Image (cartoon, rainbow, N blue to C red):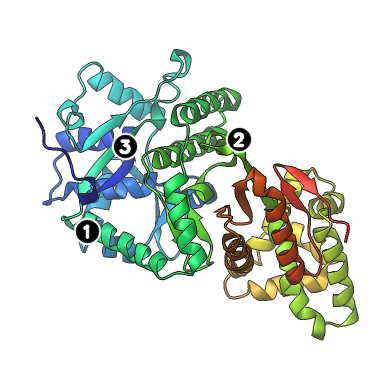
Amino acid sequence: MARPISYNKYITFYLSKVAFEHLHYKLNLVNPEFEFDMDVFYGILNDLSSIKYFNSYTQHNAFIPMSSVWLKNTYGNHYNLYIQYLVQQSIISNSPYNANQCSYYSLVTNKPIIDMLDKEFNGTPYCFEIYDSELIQKIEFQCDARVRNVVKSLEVVSVKISTKNSVGKKIKNKHNKALDVIKHSEEQIKKMNKHFKETVGINYDEAIEYTLNKYAMDVAAAFDDEEKLQSAYLKAAYRIRTTIEIKEEKFRFKRNSTNKRLDTNLTNLSKDLRPFLIGYDNMSNLDLCNSQPVLFNKMLNEELPNANESLALEIQNYKQNTLGGNWYEALMDMYNVDRDKAKEIWMKIAYSKNRSYQKEKKIFAQQYPKIYDLIKTIKRKNHSQFAIQLQITESKIFIDEIAKELVSRNIIPYTLHDGLLVPKEKEQETYDVMAKILKAHLGKVPVISINNDKFYPSN
């Protein structure tokens, strides 16, 4: 009988099955001209499969920025040999983007590769002996035979690498540092971390079935539109990996050093998968409507003491629309667009480089010239600073104040950046705490959504 694995001595990667098999196929055909460590190949594929890079996926059409400094620190001085091999063998691809700072890469998981692997190894998997290993396992998805071929690109392989080796050791050390930060965090963080790891779970089979069926429908609706097909794939891959990590208790609970947000498996989980969380039927979801535009009011309030009359009037108008829950409706009227387009326009105004999307920004600047000047000033040196400052404001309010008071009342929430999941019987008490603290910062209670129903305050 095989000796049981001591899993705390291993780090688990969840790799695209297509990329994993493509790598081994090419390694059998073309031996690298350098002495290689398989863990480095797996690590790079894991980085390009990882859900933590989802925003980078969507922003850059599935290409992920990977700086040479980061690659060197993670995989050693010879990382470039591994990257070159993977690119030359078409296992990953370079991006046409010119970021002036780092290169962008993406997994190659297209249909021709899938068809080639099926043709070469149908019925006789070339890596059968690897799949039989205790450390490498296919994760099988149960799905309708009608969508079987469609979802092949989403299949996953779990790979366990030793923490005694170079790559695993670095990942373990980074993980231990994160644990140490939590250990020395505020009391509410420690209690939320403990509660999170003891209680979070997901109805795995139902969540996977939902994801696969949704992906099949999205593919059918996309026809041959490559952009829509890519978007459908990225969303499905994201859902699958978040689901697997919760099921396997690969928990993420970390305070982001840049924006101070609390990043967890639940903040990574797609909203439409929340109903599959164990116990979700007995929870209430409270979140701040129009969160980022509303929280900008705290920054604007700091400008009021020195504001001239025109800026003060703009702030008053902005505050009325945002705190009243009508911000996107105001943008819909301003641009004569639907709600989704209005949200997209706000993202362009607030979070893009100052020189980008000038047409949209010109219209906004006509309505809010002074406020737009403030936004431009904040973004002048680094356009991401506006988003970061809003996120810091959000985390201070929700983590350092709202969550702290809730925990003091023995209500341990799951945090969702600008929202909370709490037991249903604690819904009203949680609302009261949120309303009180948000009013102290914003001057008025904003619109708060409870289980998707908006509650408009009387003040």
Q: Quadrant of the C terminus?
A: bottom right
Work out whether mark 1 precedes mark 3 in sequence or the reverse, and give the earlier one: 3
Q: Quadrant of the N terminus?
A: top left
Secondary-structure class at tag 3: helix
- In the image, is residue 125 above or below residue 388? above
Q: Quadrant of residue 148?
A: top left
Type of residue at label 3?
Ala
Counting every numbered tag in the picture gives 3
| In this rendering, position of residue 14 left or right of residue 187 | left
Residue 281 numbered tag:
2
Percent position (x, y) of residue 425? 66, 45
Circle 3 sits on which residue?
Answer: 19
> Can you tell which of label 1 and label 3 is closer to the viewer?
1
Q: In the image, what residue occupies the spot 76% across and 73% down?
A: 300
Work out whether mark 2 precedes mark 3 in sequence or the reverse, and give the earlier one: 3
Circle 1 sits on which residue?
Answer: 169
Q: Residue furthest left?
A: 1
Percent position (x, y) of residue 49? 38, 44
Percent position (x, y) of residue 438? 73, 65
Work out whether mark 2 precedes mark 1 in sequence or the reverse, and give the earlier one: 1
| In this rendering, position of residue 417 left or right of residue 43 | right
Secondary-structure class at tag 2: helix
Q: Nearer the viewer, residue 254 or 347?
A: 254
